[in-house]
């Protein structure tokens, strides 16, 4: 397994755990920090996390919790509870209701983000959902399973992969040139 794939799997695992923590806090209102102890990890299985994602349970969950706190999505109350911040509620709603928007920088870095996916016919609904979400945020379809976007969207792709429980079926590429890119430049209203 290559380094990019290992890094991608690590990011997907971390995103799933963070999502599980956010959803648990949203459902319970508050989440005791003590519930994030290794013996309470059974609740995370509800969110599709199995043993392979929880190998390094304590470290992984602690790191996810710290990233959520550092990112301002949750805060720790004086009595040892985690609660969602306004930013955390907004972020969770964006994920849950497909309102996720990719921030566009002021200047284009002249690189294309290409997403290629190979989802089997038996998962047709998942494939169609992937296409709808990509179209919603502004990707342009080059071919049925090849989509292009001009701006950095790695965070969105990682969230999408985690949300749809996909990994190796989805490939994220950063390219400097695409054949016949004049059409894409026109669609995205960009200048090379």
Image: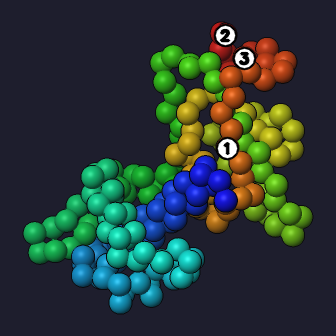
Label 1: how many Cα within 10 Å (few below 14, some 14–19, many 20+): some
Tag 2 secondary structure: loop
Sequence-first tag of 3 and 2: 3
Judging depth in this view, the residue of 79 and 27 nearest the camera is: 79
Is any part of residue 33 visible from this angle?
yes
Q: Is mark 3 on a helix, strand or loop?
A: helix
Vertical arrangement, residue 169 with respect to residue 54, above or below: above
Q: Are marks 1 and 3 in contact (CB under 8 Å)?
A: no
Q: Residue at x 63, y 40 (%)?
A: 137
Q: Position of residue 53 (x, y in %)?
A: 53, 74
In the image, residue 36 above or below residue 186:
below
Residue most toward the left?
A: 78
Quarter in which the C terminus is drawn: top right
SS type, badge 1 = strand
* Up/down of 172 relative to 35, above or below: above
| In front: label 1 or label 3 | 1
Q: Earlier in the sequence, mark 1 or mark 3?
A: 1
Q: How far apart are marks 2 and 1 (CA)?
A: 22 Å
Pointers 3 and 2 in contact (CB under 8 A)?
A: yes
Left-right relation of 64 to 99: left
Residue 54 x, y percent position in the rendering: 48, 77
Give the x, y percent position of residue 52: 56, 77
Q: Mark 1 points at which residue?
A: 172
Q: Quadrant of residue 147?
A: top right
Residue 192 badge = 2
| Gap in angstroms between the C-alphas marked 1 and 3 | 20 Å
* Residue that numbered label 3 is attached to: 185
- Classify 10 Å Cα crowding around label 2: few (below 14), some (14-19), many (20 and above): few
């Amino acid at each position: 397994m290559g380094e990019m794939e290992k890094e991608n799997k690590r990011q997907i695992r971390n995103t799933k755990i963070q999502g599980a923590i956010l959803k648990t806090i949203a459902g319970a209102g508050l989440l005791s920090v003590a519930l994030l102890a290794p013996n309470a990890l059974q609740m995370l299985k509800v969110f599709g996390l199995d043993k392979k994602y929880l190998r390094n349970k304590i470290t992984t969950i602690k790191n996810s919790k710290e990233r959520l706190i550092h990112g301002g999505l949750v805060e720790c109350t004086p009595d040892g509870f985690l609660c969602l911040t306004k930013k955390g509620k907004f972020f969770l709603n964006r994920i849950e209701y497909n309102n996720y928007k990719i921030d566009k920088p002021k200047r284009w870095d002249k690189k294309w983000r290409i997403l290629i996916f190979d989802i089997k016919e038996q998962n047709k609904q998942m494939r169609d959902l992937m296409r709808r979400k990509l179209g919603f945020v502004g990707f342009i379809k080059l071919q049925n399973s090849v989509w292009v976007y001009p701006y950095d969207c790695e965070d969105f792709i990682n969230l999408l992969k985690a949300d749809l429980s996909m990994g190796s079926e989805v490939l994220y590429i950063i390219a400097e040139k695409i054949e016949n890119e004049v059409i894409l430049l026109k669609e995205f209203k960009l200048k090379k």
